[in-house]
Image (tube, rainbow, N blue to C red):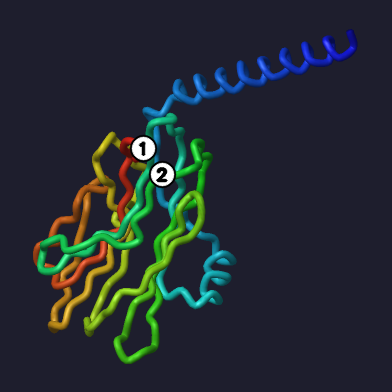
Amino acid sequence: MRNFIGCSLFIIFTLLLTGCAGVEKEKEKQLPNANITIEPYNMSEKESLLISKTGVDQIEFFKLKGNLKEDEDLQFAVEVYENGKQKEELLTTSNEPQRKFEDTIISFGISNIKDKDQSLKLIAGIPSGLVTANYSNNMTSSSFSKIVGEKVTLERNIPVYLVAWVGTTKNELRSVGSEKGKLPEGIEEAEIALLYRVIWTDNEK
């Protein structure tokens, strides 16, 4: 009898757990996500001082807020443009495990590597961690700037560009600008441009 009662309680407990898990998944599917937003994060003087001790030459931070449903994803990448044409993507991430973002910090930074190739170290802080890559660089002049200056709301399958690094070997360096995170104007005139972007899309299975 005791074994029967114990077995019955275990089955009931298991069913309750399964039911709770089902409810949680259903809640996750119903999470409101129409207002996934990104806005610049302005560092304090002390934070800027701490960052300066890390060896990162240039970096921009942003706050991410909102929710993802079970079948949705936030994908990050650095798009590489040469003479206005996209050539490749670096630091590509997908299948973001985090579902809820409460002022979650993301970032993109660049450091100069003192080697014969004058390579750049690209550093992206994403919700679930940090990704890095080296990029060979022969530009003689460059600029680095955020291209989102205020809060923007993500739209499904539409990329939002957050930061731009632009390089040239010429005497004149053209700046690039963007409105609400759209593909920057002037990119077609840049010898080399690295654009850090995020896109809200379907989860890859």
Classify mark 2: helix, strand or loop: loop
Question: Could you tell me how far apart the alpha carbons at marks 1 and 2 are, in whole angstroms?
Answer: 6 Å
Measured from the top left, where is residue 160 in percent x and y? 28, 47
Does the CB distance between marks 1 and 2 fall below 8 Å? yes
Please state the horizontal and vertical placement of residue 76, each as a whole percent of the image: 35, 51
- The residue type indicated by label 2 comes to Asn
Residue with the mark numbered 1: 203
69 displayed left or right of 89: right
Left or right placement of residue 75 versus residue 41 in this view: left
Q: Residue under label 2, please give it.
A: 95
Q: Which residue lies most toward the bottom here?
A: 116
Look at the numbered disc 1 and give the secondary structure of its residue.
loop
Name the disc covering residue 130, or none.
none
Residue 62 x/y as whole percent: 43, 52
Q: Kindly identify the amino acid type of the residue bearing the numbered disc 1.
A: Asn
Which residue is at 46% across, 39% downward?
A: 65
Residue 85, image quadrant: bottom left
Q: Position of residue 94 (x, y in %)?
A: 38, 48
Residue ID at (83%, 15%): 6
Q: Earlier in the sequence, mark 1 or mark 2?
A: 2
| Mark 2 residue crowding within 10 angstroms, few (<14) / some (14–19) / many (20+) | some
Q: Is residue 60 something that shows in the picture?
A: no
Q: Quadrant of residue 123?
A: bottom left
